[in-house]
Image: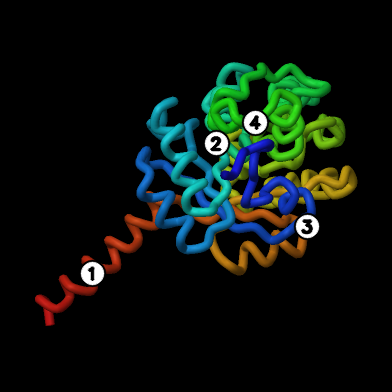
Amino acid sequence: MHIMTKTEDKTGFRQRFRSGDHLVGTFVKTPVTHVIEIIGAVGFDFVVIDEEHAPWDRVTIDAALLAARASGTAGIVRVAEPTPSKILSVLDDGAAGVLVPHVYSAKKAQEIAAACRYRGGKRGFSNTTRAGGYGAVGLWDHVAAGDENVTLIGMIEDPEALDEIDAIVATEGLDGVFIGRGDLTVAMGAASTDAPEIKNACTRIIAAARNAGKPVAVMVGTAEEAARFREMGASAFIVSSDQTFMRQAAMRAFADVAAVGRS
C-alpha cells in the first residue's frame, strides 16, 4: 500500500519555469473540465484558468484543477483579486501556481509573495485539502512541498510598474513575471500592442527580469512573435484561449462546408 508522505508535483512546473525551459500554455475561459482534459492531452505544459475575465467560481476552479492533474498539465489560476484568502483557496485546491494581475509596485509583489509562502510568508495552513493529500501529508512535509512547488507569477501591465520594475522582479518569493501587453497598451494610450512604446516597455521588463534571474512569460499570437520574444529573453508563452481555438475551428469548418453549397 502506497502511503503519501509528501505532496507530489508530477509536472515540475515551478522548477521548469524558473530554469527558463521553453513552456507553452493557454488561457481557459470556459468553466468546464473537458476543455482542460483535451488541452492537457494535446501536450500543453500549462493552462491558465482565467478567473479574472471569465465566469469561474470556487467549485468550478476546484474541478478544473483536478482535470489539470488528471491530464498531466500544470494548472495555474489567474485570480480575480490578489487577496490572501483568494490565493489561499486556489492553492489549497491544488493549483500549481497563481498568476496575479496588476502587480504595480514592489509592495504589492511582497504582499502576494507572503500570501503564497509558508516560511517567510503568511499563507494559512491546512493539510486536509487536495494540496495536502486530504490529510495524508504531514504538517512539515506539506509546508516544505508548498514552498517548493507553488509558482507565483506577477503580471506587469501598469505604466507605474515600469518605474519600480527592478524592485518588483527582485522580490523574494516572486518566481517570474508576465508581460500584460493588452493592459499596458490601453493604459498608455498606444496604437497597438506592437507600438514602439509597448516594445520599449517589454524590453525594459525583460531586461530587469533577466538581471534578477527571473523568467518572463508573454502572450503571443504567432510562432514568429514567440520567436521574437524568445530572442529577447522570454521563455514561457501563452497562446490564445480555449474560446478562440473553438471559434477559429468553427469558422473554418463552417466556411469549408458552406462553400460546397456555393460551388
Is 11 above or below relative to 169? below
Give whichever of discs 2 and 4 has the lower sequence position: 2
Quadrant placement of the N terminus? top right
Location of residue 171 in the rendering, given as x and y in whole percent from the top left corner: 83, 31
Judging by the rendered image, the residue that carries numbered circle 2 is 77
Query: Residue furthest toward the left?
Result: 261
Q: Name the residue under label 4.
A: 137
Q: Is mark 2 on a helix, strand or loop?
A: strand
Q: Residues within 10 Å of mark 2 (few under 14, many from 20)?
A: many
**Looking at the image, which is closer to me, 201 or 175?**
175
Q: What's under tag 2, amino acid-wise?
A: Val
**The disc labelled 1 sits on which kind of residue?**
Ala
Asked if residue 169 can be seen in this view, the reply is: yes
Q: In this view, does 55 lie to the left or right of 131?
A: left
Q: Disc 3 vs disc 2: which is toward the camera? A: 2
Secondary structure at numbered mark 1: helix
Q: Do the residues labelled 3 and 4 touch (CB within 8 Å)?
A: no
Report the mark closest to the observer, 4 or 1.
4
Q: Nearer the viewer, mark 1 or mark 3?
A: 3
Q: In the displayed structure, would residue 127 be above or below residue 187?
A: above
Question: How far apart are the two marked residues, 1 and 3, measured between alpha carbons?
Answer: 39 Å
Q: Which of marks 1 and 3 is nearer the N terminus?
A: 3
Amino acid type of the residue that numbered disc 4 sits on in the rendered structure = Val
Mark 1 sits on what residue? Answer: 255
Q: Residue at x 62, y 44 (%)?
A: 181
Mark 1 in CB contact with mark 3 (< 8 angstroms):
no
Residue under pointer 3: 233
Q: In this rendering, does residue 153 appear at all?
A: no
